[in-house]
Amino acid sequence: MNNVHEYSNLSCMNFDITKKQEDFISKVDSVCKSLRSIEEECYIEDRLNEKLVPEFSKIGMLGCPISKKYGGLGFDILTYCKSLERIGEEGNSMRTFFSVHTSIGQMVLQGWADEDQKKRYLPETTIGKSIMAFALTEPEAGSDPSSMNSRYEDKGEYYLLTGKKHWIGNGTIADIVTTYAKDRTTGKISAFIVDMNSSGVTKNEIKNKMGLLT
């Protein structure tokens, strides 16, 4: 993944909502209402709402701010944020799913991955075929990258990663994860795209969390 990215001037951001944006947010509202009773049950039972991905996929929410070039809807950040705001009214777990899958999952790839990586991974994430997670936090280091213990070695044809991540949103349901590790020799931090079905990857669900139960 490269590290070249251009930031827009946020002071010039337009907060006006167009008819097209209103129509999409209305679709988000409808899906939220249809999932409300199920989400309440899932919260009580401490489990993921199994209807979340298929129902939001129908309206394209899983690719809301992702370029049409990679299968997304190509909406701007304002539309995405307004959609998250509405989803958050139904429950923190539903909103967190998108914050991880899209905000720190898909958008990291869209902003910094190379073109081959974007074409390989993003299209399946916009239709819900692949779910994303972001793995930075560690048991001892917390979310401080400079203190992380995860390491990687360049083996020529592949990279060997060793380490443990903790408190990873979408961690047990994700198909692909962006994770971070230090070079075993230089200490330089790099980002990696990891297939969760790769040999050596294990995951364990953390139950009974306060506030964020699923």
Image: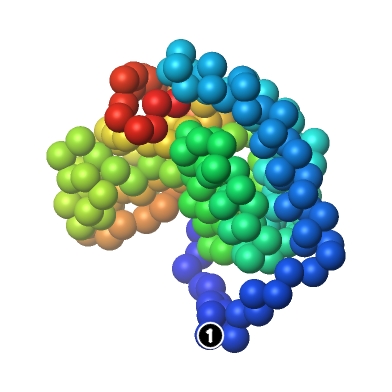
Specify few, some or many for label 1: CA neighbours under 10 Å numbering under 14, 14-19, or 20 or more: few
For this orientation, the residue located farthest to the top is 45
Residue carrying label 1: 11
Asked whether, in this view, residue 45 is left or right of residue 19, the answer is: left
Q: Is residue 123 above or below residue 69?
A: above
Q: Is residue 173 above or below residue 90?
A: above
**Residue 86 place in picture, x, y as percent:** 61, 48
Asked whether, in this view, residue 65 is left or right of residue 141, the answer is: right
| Residue for point 34% across, 19% down | 207
Quick one: 159 or 75, which is closer to the camera?
75
**Residue 37 place in picture, x, y as percent:** 62, 22
| Residue for point 54% across, 17% down | 41
Quick one: 69 or 188, which is closer to the camera?
69
Q: In which quarter of the image is residue 21?
A: bottom right
Disc 1 marks which amino acid? Ser
Quick one: 91 or 56, which is closer to the camera?
91
**Residue 24 place in picture, x, y as percent:** 78, 53
Mark yes or no: residue 176 visible. no
Q: In which quarter of the image is residue 51?
A: top right
**Residue 125 place in picture, x, y as percent:** 66, 41
Mark yes or no: residue 136 visible. yes
